[in-house]
Image (spheres, helix red, strand yellow):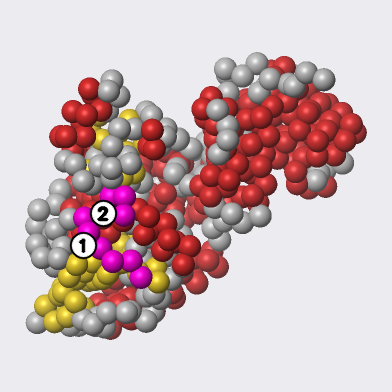
């Protein structure tokens, strides 16, 4: 029997979704599923899997009326097969309808036999006869926005109360875009990288605030300079953290949650020594590989729990705290499916504990930098306010060299995706009295 064209990419996308449902992070699932695919199939599989995750609520709302027995009774793998088909029919103009339906039917047959294939065929052909519409809701209707942009309702309600309806919709729309690849200098300057890539006919342009170079290429491993550690992949928001930190030359730094190592490498260029710790052995292996490829040699990776810092007091400490990650939903399309109000409360407690522990290894006169990739005040400025009330020996000391447009009224780094067109991030610079 002749293989169906395009089936491999759809099969790989389904595998990614299956692994994400089982708890594996999206990036790790991609690595496992896409390794042997040709580039065109790899790109399509990535786009399909990410698109389904970004639009899951809206896709389910379109599919559910076409399932008489009830959407919740459909086997999970067939739900994802239907979502893949529906995303191609409603979200990818370049995919012919027959290709979307035929490949989905084939996947359904592989998962559940001929009966499953017939079911998927009927549902998707029914969808093709309808005219999908967004929820009948204005921009002030949180429930409509949550469904249209596939975000948790409780989170959309929080953002609407804080930012207003129009700004919240801009944030949701940003989260549904696929970020471009941003590259940061490591062992070569940004000018050297730009010359090297332009000579190889690779188009690049400056990232916002000059924080790296942006390209439409998708695989950094194939760019000139990767093997030599000339650059690393890092969002502008994370690169700007190193600028905001403004460490003095020759500082000794403890990076308490260092993996995968982008901030460690950026900060290590001007430091005398960086102790880069992470509690996970597998993450430290990845950290070590990145340091070997692109580090300065000043960094030393260790397996260590930040609640028990493995260092004597140093003049600089960075805590990039575990957080809800609401600033990086565009880059991590599965993250929105994992967040919950109870997780926010749990993370607040963990952040407070970690701050207490790492503050103990900040030497008198030293600097403590607290950062997250969250947009939530409880994890950011309110967490810092609480810490400062308990520790009058620390005070905020904003960077004097950083763009004021990215600073909060208190002087904290505050990057908002809907305003700044990059991942969201927060950081506070806290000085210990001498």
Q: Return the residue at label 2.
A: 295
Q: Is residue 345 left or right of residue 276?
A: right
Q: For the C terminus, give its image quadrant.
A: bottom left
In this view, 71 is above or below 244: above
Apparent side of residue 9 relative to residue 388 in the rendered image (left or right): right
Q: Secondary structure at mark 2?
A: loop
Counting from the top left corner in percent of width and height, residue 306 is at 37, 75
Q: Residue at x 31, y 54 (%)?
A: 292
Q: Quadrant of residue 274?
A: bottom left
Q: Is residue 37 above or below residue 79?
A: above
Is residue 154 visible to the viewer in this orientation of the structure? no
Q: Nearer the viewer, residue 379 or 35?
A: 35
Q: Quadrant of residue 177?
A: top left
The spot of residue 10 in percent (x, y) is 66, 31
Q: How many labels sit on residues?
A: 2
Q: Is residue 273 left or right of residue 150?
A: left
Contact flag, marks 2 and 1 (Cβ < 8 Å): yes
- Cα distance, mark 2 to mark 1? 7 Å
- What segment carries the magenta color? 292-302
Q: In the rendered view, does 119 fall on the left or right side of 255?
A: right
Q: Which residue is mark 1?
A: 298
Q: Is residue 168 above or below residue 313?
A: above
Looking at the rendered structure, the secondary structure element under dot 1 is loop
């Amino acid at each position: 029997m002749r293989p169906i064209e395009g089936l491999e990419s759809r099969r790989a996308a389904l595998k990614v979704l299956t692994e994400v449902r089982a708890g594996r992070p999206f990036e790790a699932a991609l690595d496992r599923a896409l390794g042997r695919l040709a580039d065109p199939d790899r790109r399509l599989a990535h786009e399909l899997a990410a698109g389904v995750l970004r639009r899951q609520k809206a896709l389910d709302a379109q599919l559910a009326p076409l399932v008489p027995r009830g959407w919740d009774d459909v086997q999970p793998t067939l739900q994802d097969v239907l979502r893949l088909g529906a995303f191609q029919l409603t979200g990818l103009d370049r995919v012919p309808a027959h290709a979307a339906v035929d490949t989905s039917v084939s996947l359904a047959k592989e998962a559940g036999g001929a009966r499953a294939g017939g079911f998927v065929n009927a549902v998707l052909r029914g969808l093709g006869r309808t005219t999908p519409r967004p929820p009948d809701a204005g921009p002030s209707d949180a429930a409509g926005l949550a469904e249209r942009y596939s975000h948790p309702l409780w989170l959309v309600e929080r953002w609407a109360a804080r930012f207003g309806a129009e700004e919240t919709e801009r944030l949701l729309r940003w989260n549904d875009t696929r970020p471009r690849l941003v590259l940061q200098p490591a062992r070569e300057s940004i000018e050297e990288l730009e010359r090297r890539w332009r000579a190889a006919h690779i188009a690049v342009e400056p990232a916002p605030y000059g924080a790296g170079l942006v390209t439409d290429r998708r695989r950094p491993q194939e760019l000139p300079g990767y093997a030599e550690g000339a650059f690393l992949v890092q969002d502008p928001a994370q690169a700007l953290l190193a600028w905001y930190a403004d460490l003095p030359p020759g500082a000794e730094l403890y990076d308490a949650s260092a993996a995968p190592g982008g901030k460690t490498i950026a900060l290590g260029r001007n430091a005398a020594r960086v102790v880069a710790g992470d509690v996970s052995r597998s993450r430290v292996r990845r950290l070590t590989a990145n340091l070997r490829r692109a580090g300065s040699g000043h960094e030393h990776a260790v397996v260590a729990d930040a609640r028990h810092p493995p260092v004597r007091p140093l003049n600089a400490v960075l805590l990039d705290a575990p957080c809800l990650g609401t600033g990086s939903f565009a880059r991590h399309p599965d993250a929105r499916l994992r967040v919950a109000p109870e997780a926010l409360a749990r993370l607040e407690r963990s952040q407070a504990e970690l701050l207490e522990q790492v503050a103990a290894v900040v030497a008198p006169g030293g600097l403590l930098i607290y950062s997250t990739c969250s947009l939530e005040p409880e994890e950011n400025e309110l967490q810092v306010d609480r810490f400062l009330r308990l520790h009058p020996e620390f005070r905020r000391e904003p960077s004097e060299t950083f763009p004021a447009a990215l600073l909060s009224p208190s002087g904290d780094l505050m990057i908002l995706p809907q305003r700044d067109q990059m991942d969201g991030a927060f950081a506070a610079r806290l000085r210990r009295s001498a």
